[in-house]
């Protein structure tokens, strides 16, 4: 078998949907599993859909995910250029070859004439409004016109497109690695445009030519491309032969949480979760759409979650690193049916990865979050210790701030309601004595503080459990956080005393 070569072929038209990242991932996993190459080719032939910054953004998303292309517009490669707009000159000869072979034709119809054809078809009560075998001889093209007329149009520079001639009595059959054998009747397929009037190929021609020239062996893409597959296969048959065609896999859709249709950016906005990999700023409106990265997802968790949306390892294992996914992945285990997106499950993966990775892997990111909120981190050893203590309570990276900012900022508000109803002068007395005692403690650790606390409680005849909540409110300000003696030990003696003293004044009121 020739070397496996797969491609991700995005059109730079906006934010990178999580379905796109999953397509990247499955291609990448397959390539790496088989010792092959992963190529990123930018499909930007539709200039009307071009969006500034979208290409750079796609590469930033891949970099965040830790997925490196073997060949791309960035790293280059033997099959450069990897941007279709730079390959423009290359496609024309294939389109001309098809015309010469009678498999495609010049079409001179104006947009108005096409619109009239559609209206007529509608008026005739026709289900289909497309430009196809049923109408092509009534239109203005090199099949319906006399050769001299065609030549005259061409000589006069009349704008034209090149359309594929789909034979309506034939059909297309091919094997999809996920869906098995698929069959399409040509009568439902239109004479798609292959070359546009501006001399640019359409996606349909460019994708086939480039997959051939770049020696692509497997093409995995979203299910939404399935309706285009028959035209692509006809082009392969006409131009390069089916033996050279890549093996196809059309990946299942990622569905809305309720399973009702494809997950869109709008669903994310409506239901309050991200759909894009990273923050995307629309250059026209400046509207920012939130991404998984900026909301505090780790790339390991994001990829792990995506891998499981449409693929299963055939075992109970849910947590996979990228290397483990490379090992476990097989295209046969990709499901046919759509996969419902579940944001809670996505967060669950992130929580798992926060526990699994060493703090050092994400400490810098958390530090940035603290600094954005005005807390300078100078002692990274101390910081790491704190992050370790609270990580079990964190799902997204900003949770670290919620869970640990009190270590750096003494409370200015206290949940007094939690203390007041059971606050007594005996308890106040206990804490005053406690301050005196801890002043004398030589080693100030969670264990020594706890022992002292419990002994003093017994001496004062108060249940330690009744004193721990007030102590927590004194140190944290609220009813959360790790074990209270651990907190005290990390705050150290002086700060612990200050916080207790301050709170005692407040509780008085
Ligand atoms: N350019 C297409 C896209 O934007 C690629 C489809 C394919 O992989 O063939 O998704």
Image (spheres, grey):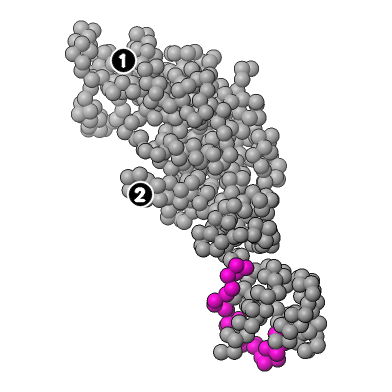
Q: Quadrant of residue 155?
A: top left
Instruction: Give the mark count.
Output: 2
Per the rendered image, the range of residues in magenta is 406-431
Image position of 366 with respect to 312: above or below = below
Asked whether the viewer can see residue 401, the reply is yes
Q: Residue at x 23, y 13 (%)?
A: 154
Q: Taking the image as drawn, is residue 185 in sight? A: no
Image coordinates of residue 218 in percent, x first then y, are 56, 25
Residue under numbered circle 1: 105
Q: Which residue is rendered at x = 72% and y = 70% of the image? A: 489
Circle 2: element type: loop
The yes-or-no answer for disc 1 within 8 Å of ligand 1 is: no
Residue on which disc 2 sits: 286
Q: Give coordinates of residue 509: x percent, y percent.
A: 56, 89
Q: Is residue 460 left or right of residue 11?
A: right
Picture layout, residue 266 above or below residue 440: above
Q: Residue at x 54, y 76 (%)?
A: 412
Q: For this view, does 233 lie left or right of residue 110?
A: right
Residue 348 location (% of width, % of height): 61, 54
- Mark 2 nearby-residue class (10 Å; few <14, some 14–19, many ≥20): few
441 and 250: which one is in front?
A: 441
Picture layout, residue 137 above or below residue 478: above
Apparent side of residue 10 relative to residue 456 in the rendered image (left or right):
left
Q: Label 1 vs label 2: CA separation?
A: 43 Å
Give the mark nearer the N terminus: 1 vs 2.
1
Report x, y in % for residue 314: 69, 39
């Amino acid at each position: 078998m020739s070397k496996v070569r797969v491609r991700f072929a995005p059109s730079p038209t906006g934010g990178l949907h999580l379905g796109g990242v999953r397509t990247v991932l499955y291609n990448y996993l397959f390539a790496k599993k088989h010792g092959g190459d992963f190529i990123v080719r930018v499909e930007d032939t539709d200039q009307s859909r071009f969006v500034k910054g979208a290409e750079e953004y796609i590469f930033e998303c891949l970099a965040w995910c830790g997925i490196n292309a073997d060949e791309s517009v960035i790293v280059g490669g033997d099959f450069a250029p990897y941007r279709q707009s730079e390959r423009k000159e290359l496609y024309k000869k294939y389109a001309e070859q098809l015309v010469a072979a009678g498999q495609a034709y010049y079409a001179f119809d104006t947009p108005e004439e096409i619109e009239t054809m559609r209206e007529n078809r509608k008026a005739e009560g026709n289900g289909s409004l497309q430009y196809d075998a049923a109408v092509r001889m009534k239109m203005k093209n090199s099949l319906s016109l006399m050769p001299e007329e065609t030549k005259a149009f061409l000589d006069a520079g009349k704008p034209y497109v090149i359309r594929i001639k789909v034979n309506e009595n034939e059909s297309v059959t091919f094997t999809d690695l996920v869906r098995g054998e698929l069959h399409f009747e040509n009568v439902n397929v239109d004479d798609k445009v292959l070359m546009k009037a501006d001399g640019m190929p359409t996606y349909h021609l460019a994708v086939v030519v480039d997959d051939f020239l770049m020696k692509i062996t497997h093409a995995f893409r979203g299910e939404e491309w399935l309706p285009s597959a028959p035209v692509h296969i006809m082009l392969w048959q006409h131009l390069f032969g089916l033996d050279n065609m890549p093996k196809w896999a059309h990946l299942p859709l990622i569905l809305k949480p309720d399973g009702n249709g494809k997950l869109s950016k709008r669903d994310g906005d409506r239901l309050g979760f991200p759909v894009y990999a990273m923050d995307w700023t629309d250059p026209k409106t400046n509207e920012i759409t939130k991404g998984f990265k900026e909301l505090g997802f780790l790339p390991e968790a994001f990829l792990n979650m995506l891998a499981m949306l449409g693929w299963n390892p055939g075992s109970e294992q849910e947590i996979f690193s990228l290397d483990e996914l490379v090992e476990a992945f097989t295209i046969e285990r990709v499901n046919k049916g759509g996969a419902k997106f579940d944001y809670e499950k996505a967060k669950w993966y992130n929580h798992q990865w926060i526990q699994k990775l060493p703090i050092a892997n994400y400490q810098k990111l958390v530090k940035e979050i603290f600094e954005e909120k005005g807390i300078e981190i100078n002692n990274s050893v101390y910081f790491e210790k704190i992050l370790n203590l609270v990580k079990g309570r964190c799902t997204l990276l900003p949770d670290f701030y919620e869970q640990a900012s009190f270590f750096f900022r003494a409370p200015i508000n206290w949940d007094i309601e939690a203390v007041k109803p059971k606050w007594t002068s005996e308890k106040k007395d206990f804490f005053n004595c406690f301050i005196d005692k801890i002043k004398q403690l030589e080693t100030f650790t969670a264990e020594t503080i706890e022992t002292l606390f419990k002994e003093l409680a017994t001496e004062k005849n108060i249940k330690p459990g009744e004193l721990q909540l007030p102590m927590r409110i004194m140190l944290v300000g609220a009813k959360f956080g790790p074990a209270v003696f651990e907190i005290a030990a990390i705050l150290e003696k002086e700060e612990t005393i200050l916080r207790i003293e301050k709170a005692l004044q407040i509780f008085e009121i």
